[in-house]
Image (cartoon, rainbow, N blue to C red):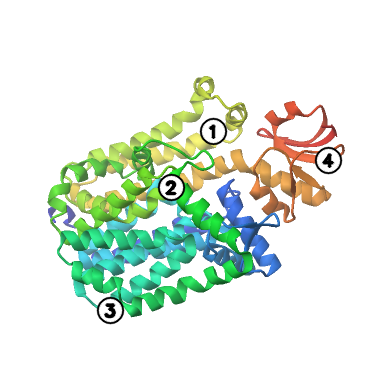
Amino acid sequence: MRFLKNAIPEKQLFGIFILIAFGSLFPWLGATPLFDEDEGYFSEVSREMAVSGNYLTAYLNGKPEYDKPVLTYWAQAASFKLFGFNEFAARFPSALATFIWGIAMFIFVRRKIDINTAFCAALFMISAIQMTITGKAAIADALLNLFITLAMFSVFNYFESGKTSSLCLAALFTGVGFLTKGPVAVMIPVVVGLLYAIITKKTALWVRAAVSPAAWAIFLAVALPWYVLEYLDQGNAFLEDFFIKHNLQRFQSAMEGHYGSFFYYAPVILIGTLPHVWVLFPCLRNIRRFVKQPLLLYCALWFGFIFIFFSLAATKLPHYIIYGYTPVFIFYAVTYLSLKNYRKYIAIGLGVLIIFTILPLCINLIKPLIGDAFALIVIESAGTYFDSYYFLQCGICIIILSGVFWLSETDRLKIALITACVYLFFINSVLMPRLGGLMQSPVKEAAFLARQKNYDIVIYRHTLPSFIFYRQEFVREGEPEPNDIIITKKTRLKTIKGYEILYEKNGLIMARVSEP
């Protein structure tokens, strides 16, 4: 490609990506407290599993939980055994899964397209804002995304070669995915594979896969035993809660207030794939030309199905769309390497950094738009965290990224590399530790105080699984009685007649109740 003359030597690209991926994931795992609700939920369930030695049924605060299958809890429990009960251990399985995901994407795209496209695709993935955050979060999605990606790569290899070995690998990864989060891990490769088979007139291969004894044997051997044992242990309560409530009903009706329009995921993608999102627009313009290539057709079907399916689902959460990010970043890479004007790509990243820099200065302008009283208290506390050092770090990032404008078009890979590194530093070192301190450090500090003082705590009208994790002891939830010590939002104290505050920070209160 004419844009890549005198670019980074091919032999160095894989090593550079490994260094960036490792440096962006593992050193930052303990930089922020666990976020509620999801990180706290998974971490506490896994902690209770590790402590109790019951590796069959998940429990939260001593009560059985059927939301998710068991693999993520197993991975986190093993990590706790290895590293102790801390944020690093809770997030390590997700970070490792994302690291492997990046390597798998690099190798796959290198074989199917070329090494420059492989480097850009993997680099865009590891440095996109949503993946920088979600990719190492202590939740199930990074693991599920890895297994879906590996299954989808294997399915494509199967359609290309017809080899049973590729089909068996797809069955293996689908089975592990089913053990991670359930039916979605099966649905995506099966449906996308069928669509691709129909369009490319390879339905005979798809039918052969669907009835393959070897594939079924591998899938059932991996996925079935835990489900059978869990049913024998928990009975219909497991089937009804997991399959009916958390799968069928999640699609049919919005759960826990997580709803949105059909276009919910459009802004998620626009924000989540920053700073590389400008590539999306020339990508869409060239989509008809791209899908003439088998791999890019497969990628378009992969992303399109996930976008439409989760857009139709009543329950919507931002991280659902990441199951379709592998094809998105492959498209981004192909498009980026053919851009005629790379300066628009840099301008988007630079503009967003400037917005992040000035946003803390606009707190007084934002406050009238905030309807939630507790959120308003948290925002008013932000000045302590977004200090002069924050603006200095932002300024350095802006200066470095501005310098990229003077690079030649032949330095296309270096432009992407510098942009990615600036954003990885900003998200991991500048932004997330401050957001974590603002939102979750009060929970962690209050839990440590309760553990030190041996307080018997009642969680009052709040959801704080991370508090239970840091407290490392079951915590009663409900209405307080006289002399109970509660932890709650400051705004909830209006319902308590008499109390003595023992701890207060950023809207979180720990108080001894004298009169409920």
Q: CA distance from mark 1 to mark 3?
A: 60 Å
Q: Horizontal placement of 33 versus 413: left or right? A: right
- First in residue order: circle 3 vs circle 2: 3
Residue 251: mark: 2
* Residue depicted at 63% across the width and 58% down the height: 45
- In contact (CB < 8 Å): disc 4 and disc 1: no
| Disc 4: which residue | 484
| Disc 3: which residue | 164
Residue type at mark 2? Phe
Q: Residues within 10 Å of mark 1 (few under 14, many from 20)?
A: few
- First in residue order: circle 2 vs circle 4: 2
| Disc 1: which residue | 388
- In contact (CB < 8 Å): disc 2 and disc 4: no
Residue type at mark 3? Thr
- First in residue order: circle 1 vs circle 2: 2
Q: Horizontal placement of 191 versus 483: left or right? A: left
Q: Horizontal placement of 417 versus 361: left or right? A: left
Image position, residue 283 (x, y; %): 21, 45
Q: CA distance from mark 4 to mark 1?
A: 41 Å
Q: Residues within 10 Å of mark 3 (few under 14, many from 20)?
A: some
Marks 1 and 2: which is nearer the front?
A: 2
Q: CA distance from mark 1 to mark 2?
A: 46 Å
Marks 1 and 3: which is nearer the front?
A: 3
Q: Quadrant of the C terminus?
A: top right
Q: CA distance from mark 2 to mark 4?
A: 40 Å
In front of the other: 151 or 339 = 151
Image position, residue 391 (x, y; %): 49, 34
Residue type at mark 1? Ser
Q: Horizontal placement of 46 versus 176: left or right? A: right
Image position, residue 372 (x, y; %): 58, 27
* Above or below 4: residue 349: above
* Above or below 296: residue 505: above
